[in-house]
Amino acid sequence: MTEAAVNFVIDKLTNSLENEVQLFRDAEEVVSSVRGQFECIRACLRVADSLEESDDEVKVWVKQLREIAYDTEDALDKFKLLSAHDHGVGFAGLLSKISCCVKNRKARYRTIWRYRTSTPESKAYVMGTRGYATSLVKLKMAQASITLTTHGKNTKIMPFLDKTELVGIEEPKKQLIGWLVEGTSKRQVISVVGMGGLGKTTLVNQVYEDPEVKKHFTICTRITLSGSPNIGELLHDMLRQIMRVIRKPIPSGAETTNIYWLKMIIKDLLQRMRYLVVLDDTWRIDEWDAVKHALPNNTCGSRIIITTRNADLAYTSCREFKGKVYKMEPLPVEHSWKLFCKKTFQVNSCPSHLKESCEFILRKCEGLPLAIVAISGVLATKDRHRTDEWELVCRSLRSEIDCNDKLKNLKRVLSLSFNDLPYYLKACFLHLSLFPEGHPIKRRRLIRLWVAEGFVEKKEGKTLEQVAKDYFMELLNRSLIEVASKRSDGRVKTCRIHDFLRDIITSRSTDQGFAEIAKGENREWPDKVRRLSIQNTLQTLPRNWSLSQLRSLYIFGVDKSLMNSVLASDMKLLTVLDMQTAPLTRFPAQVADWCYLRYLSFRFTEVSTIPSSIGKLQNLETLDLKHTNVTELPVEILKLQRLRHLLVYRYKNVSYSSSKFGFKALRGIGALQSLQKLCYLEANDENSSSVIRELGLLTQLDRLAILKLRKEDGRDLCLSISKLTRLRAISIASLDDDEIIDLQHLSSPPSFLQRIYLRGRLGALPHWLPSLSSLMKLHLRAVA
């Protein structure tokens, strides 16, 4: 997203150029001025964010700002590279450094000068002088207009499913009616939650119109909130519906009264009635909060139904009033097939020669009723004797969604959830487009990548990883991603995204210059690429394609020749290099020169040694060597003061029931004081005692894993653990079958400790276990 790019520039102007103030007398003025311009740009972008999809002029303007931000960031980083060389030590090193400073002084000055003058390179500075206050006012006016249009007039023509298009609705309808007419006499909330297109509104409409429901309730009203509603207008609409049912005129002055008194009027009217209120398409908790005070908590058996895509809203509202949540699920295969055939062929079967194509398309729909109905409408117009037409739809489904008028409503419904995201979540959601279709996406991997990519904002009292976890849960609660698998203690392990949502964000990702997905040969590649995902169907890189501006590279299943070709490119500005499962047998020497790397993963490769040159990667935050052959790290790793996640281990048979292997204890590891996760440290050599004591210096650790622990090191380990107040998970394995894990010396265990994994002999359970109020999992296993 463009705002993310601008944030990068602001941060780098602050952190990078300010370090050069000593070299240039007027640099501080330049930094302050340029940063001010970008802060103005950022303010405008936050307003423009909601207009970009509906206003072509805004879209072009945002694109230009994005390019300016990217060019500025590149210039700043190249400027920083000029002073990042290692000149060696001693007199020769001093001479080299002096020579380099003299040689680069003019180049550095030119970089500063770009932001002081109206040269082509200083577009950001020039644009900043063009009346941002005026632009912001115009944007806000346009935003207000768009909001009224999209959330008022247009929401009334949302493409809901017709009751004749429903299959498998009888059971959920019966359950909801039961919840409405039976049970407690107290007011109760029933939330119907699920992603867009599942048919929530259609189901609730069927329930609302059911004769049994109409007979049971004295008053039935239904209002649609849809995003950014005018609460006053909605309350007036509710009042009109109530007065129509009781056949009385609207109270005088109600049309002009304020919202507070309007709520009081409605509350007084409903106080002694059994009412049913449907709040359809509710997006945010504040919308519910704005309406709920108009609905009295009587003892007449009143009910409120909320339909929403927001799971947090669904569960919060139901907890508040001890209600019930109905989670809408995709249609099962048999119901999907029945609906598909009914809409496409007007019968309950499919011609045998089209069955393969139809099954492929239906798999893409993943049980989403709106998608099935929309695509069936397209296929119903195709010649059933021309299998080539049907195969063409299969091959070009993404472009069909973008271009076919009959599928535009499907795209609009699914896009609403993306459009409603706050700016800080849009980049995180677009980032999912970099993973191949069907690829399991690990939550921990995502969180570390979002931090490395710079998507996560600092929040007081929280680490960036904790904020990123909040982002993940918010996407989950908004029904944009779904849980694919969980760990034994209930935590999310992997997630997935609906194929059609993936197609939509992949298209946006490309259009907005966020990322490129390289998996086919027959397309025109852009000149500049910021993030690149190379997938296994790509055979060669486009000729003369430069990766010099690339910031993130993801490689999925490519062959060795293509991988070598990519790694030979000039990528000195690279921040993220994710090469999981790549056909790699050694650590690429050139990687050590990419000094901006924050995230480096060779997981599931055959890499066995790490060179001492890794010490040059001073910005590295994550080093992922899980399931490689690495058993030892060079002492230069201790130079990486920003390292937050150090993962070096493997399983013998890639199974949690097999033996683990980590890396040899490294004397001096206490220097890595930014570490949050350290797995797995082997503590069985002559350095182990001092290394165990040094662990107490790693006060940021929240996950610690140790292998081959000796009994005599137990006391030192307990002393270190007592200092790790942020520790949430610890895993310890003893040296061998006869070695006892001695943890009895721990007097004050970390209060937030949630998970403990112990593998080996125990003389007794640690005496401090009962004091752990946060403990969720205790895993005990004998040494095999």
Image (spheres, rainbow, N blue to C red):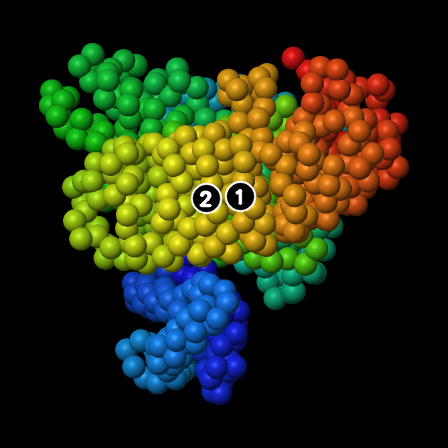
Task: Give whichever of 699, 178 is nearer the camera.
Answer: 699
Provide residue 597's location: percent of width, then percent of height: 45, 52
Q: Residue furthest front?
A: 91
Find numbered disc 1 in the image and state the secondary structure of the residue it sits on: loop
Q: Which mark is residue 48?
A: none
- Which quarter of the picture shows residue 297? top right
Circle 1 is placed at which residue position? 634
Q: Which amino acid type corresponds to the residue marked 2 in the rendered image?
A: Pro
Kindly identify the residue that appears in the image at 14 percent across and 28 percent down. 389
Q: Earlier in the sequence, mark 1 or mark 2?
A: 2
- Visible residue check, residue 738: yes
Q: Relative to 769, is 108 on the left or the right?
A: left
Residue type indicated by callout 1:
Pro
Helix, strand, or loop for circle 2?
Answer: loop
Relative placement, left or right, of 424 versus 393 is right
Pinpoint residue 90: horizontal percent, then vertical percent.
Answer: 50, 67
Question: Badge 2: few (under 14), some or many (20 or more) residues near its Cα, within 10 Å?
Answer: some
Q: Going 81% across and 26% down the picture, which residue do you hit? A: 742
Q: Which mark is residue 611?
A: 2
Determine the residue positioned at 35% across, 77% down: 103
Quarter where residue 384 is shown: top left
The quadrant holding residue 354 is: top left
Q: Are marks 1 and 2 in contact (CB under 8 Å)?
A: yes
